[in-house]
Image: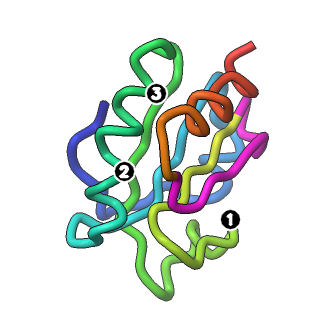
C-alpha cells in the first residue's frame, strides 16, 4: 500500500488510459477521515495484489478529483482499464472496500 499522497496528479487522459485494476484514493494527509480509513484500505488490499493503488492529494481546484465528482475525503474510485466501476466516500469498514475491489478484480 502506498504511504504518501502524491502531490502531482495524473491527468484524466492518463487515468482513462490505465490498463488493469486501479484504486484511486483522493484525500489529504491532514484529513482525520483519511487517516482513519488507512488501516481499512490496507486490510482490504491484502487479498488484491493486482490492484494498483494511487493516493492523490486532493484540494479545491484540483482537476482530477473534480472530474470524478470528489467532494468529501477520502473518496475511493475503483477502475478497471481506466473505467470507473465503483466509488466509495468515507468508507466505514474494510468489508465495503473489499466488496468494491471484488467488482473490479474479477
Nearer to us in this view, 60 or 17:
60
* Residue 53 falls left or right of residue 18: left
Q: Position of residue 104 (x, y in %)?
A: 72, 26
Is the residue under label 3 in contact with that under label 2 (CB below 8 Å)? Answer: no
* Residue 98 falls left or right of residue 74: right
Determine crowd level at label 2: few under 14, some 14-19, many 20+ residues with C-alpha closer than 10 A. Answer: some
Q: Position of residue 80 (x, y in %)?
A: 72, 30
Which mark is on residue 37? 2
Q: Position of residue 61 (x, y in %)?
A: 50, 87
**Whole-Å distance between the Cαs marked 2 and 3?**
11 Å
Eyeballing the image, is 87 above or below 68?
above
Q: Sequence order check: which comes first, mark 2 or mark 3?
A: 2
**Whole-Å distance between the Cαs marked 3 and 1?**
22 Å
Residue carrying label 3: 44
Residues drawn in magenta = 80-91
Q: Is residue 89 shown in magenta?
A: yes
Residue carrying label 1: 68
Amino acid at each position: 500500500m502506498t504511504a504518501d499522497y502524491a502531490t502531482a496528479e495524473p491527468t484524466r487522459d492518463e487515468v482513462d488510459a490505465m490498463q488493469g485494476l486501479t484504486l484511486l484514493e483522493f484525500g489529504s494527509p491532514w484529513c482525520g477521515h483519511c487517516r482513519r480509513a488507512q488501516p481499512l484500505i490496507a486490510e482490504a488490499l491484502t487479498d488484491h495484489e493486482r490492484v494498483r493503488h494511487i493516493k492523490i492529494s486532493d484540494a479545491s481546484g484540483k482537476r482530477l478529483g473534480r472530474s470524478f465528482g470528489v467532494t468529501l475525503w477520502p473518496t475511493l474510485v475503483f477502475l478497471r482499464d481506466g473505467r470507473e466501476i465503483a466509488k466509495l466516500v468515507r468508507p466505514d469498514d474494510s468489508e465495503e472496500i473489499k466488496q468494491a475491489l471484488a467488482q473490479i478484480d474479477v
